[in-house]
Image (tube, grey):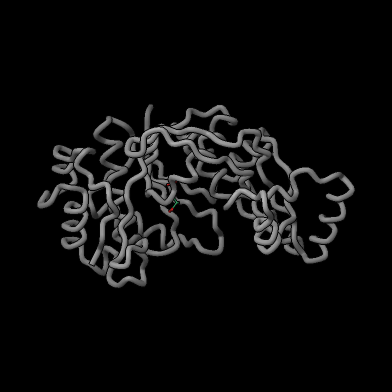
Amino acid sequence: MAAGRYAPSPSGDLHLGNLRTAVLAWLFARRSGRDFYLRVEDIDSERSSPESARRQITDLSSLGLDYDPPVVYQSERGALYEEALARLPVYECYCTRRDIREAASAPHARPGMYPGTCRDLTEEQRALRRHELAEAGRMPALRLRASAREWTVRDVYHGEVTGPVDDVILRRGGNLNQAQAGDWAYNLAVVVDDGEQGVDQVVRGDDLLSSAPAQAYLAHLLGYVEPAYVHVPLVVNALGQRLAKRDGAVTLREMGLGAAWAEIVRSIGCEGVGSAAELLEVFEPKGLPREPWVWR
Ligand code: GLU
């Protein structure tokens, strides 16, 4: 069964930009006869909370978005990630953020990409770095040993997008003293979940377009269908910055359902439409403004 999804991180209430993306994800899925899943991306153990997930789901339901069970929680899916990890070429990475920052300023570093510091170490070098890290109470992270430098995805609004493939982190560094492996990384979890859930349509904010090539490459390596992408413009504040909670009353509970709904439908070219069911009848992908939506 073909499916779409909305996959929020439960680290606070959804704001207008998140809600708008959720409505669009639901519209794209339902108008194409797909299942629509909610997936709680709670792998970041420090920032996620079950209470926040519960509030997000309540807010999405109050907009009239229906979803197909079950709601999936990434924190419960470690076994699947473990299995996928075992099928991928990986290497240990001992770098701190600072190491990466420093190496990234070297002359032939690719901007924003992992500079490859730990990719080709000898076994002796690895033993030494592992030991140094252990002294600091840390365990190494695991990175993908990518053999493609770039990958091409198809996006409804952006057409064919070719972007760089990085040696992305698959599992974060852990804490040795607590004998605890690190959190699963977003890039691995998102690809495994989309693959395992049969998600073949990914609708999300434009800020994630640059991760799509590496994710599609990872899907390819794992033998999953590479999804069709729909990256939609973000909601921004008056300064053109991505909307954030500090921008004022931007959550559904702060704005009130009526005002939030009115703003969402206006922002997607459907001003005045009163309900999700009605929206499904009239929404036209071509009518979605292609510029970021400015919230004032
Ligand atoms: N959990 C991510 C976020 O809230 C979205 C991931 C995705 O849609 O691929 O930003």
Q: Where does residue 164 sit, x and y in percent of width and height? A: 55, 41
Residue 222: image quadrant is top right
* 204 w.r.t. 15: above or below: above
* 22 w.r.t. 224: above or below: below
Q: Where does residue 253 sit, x and y in percent of width and height? A: 27, 66
* 64 w.r.t. 87: above or below: below
Q: Residue drawn 70% across and 57% down?
A: 103
Camera-side residue of 234 and 19: 234
Given the current orientation, which residue lies at the most extreme right position? Answer: 124
Q: Residue drawn 54% across and 44% down?
A: 189
Given the current orientation, which residue lies at the most extreme front position? Answer: 107
**Residue 58 in view:** no
**How many numbered marks, from 0 up?**
0
Q: Where does residue 100 sit, x and y in percent of width and height? A: 67, 58
Q: Residue drawn 23% across and 38% down?
A: 285
Is 147 situated left or right of 229 in this image? right
Q: Residue drawn 41% across and 48% down?
A: 7
Is 131 situated left or right of 235 in this image? right
Which quarter shows the C terminus? bottom left
Is 143 situated left or right of 46 in this image? right
Camera-side residue of 27 and 143: 143
Camera-side residue of 103 and 88: 103
**Residue 71 in view:** yes
Q: Where does residue 37 sit, x and y in percent of width and height? A: 37, 41
Residue 286: image quadrant is top left
Is 4 situated left or right of 87 in this image? left
Which quarter shows the N terminus? top left
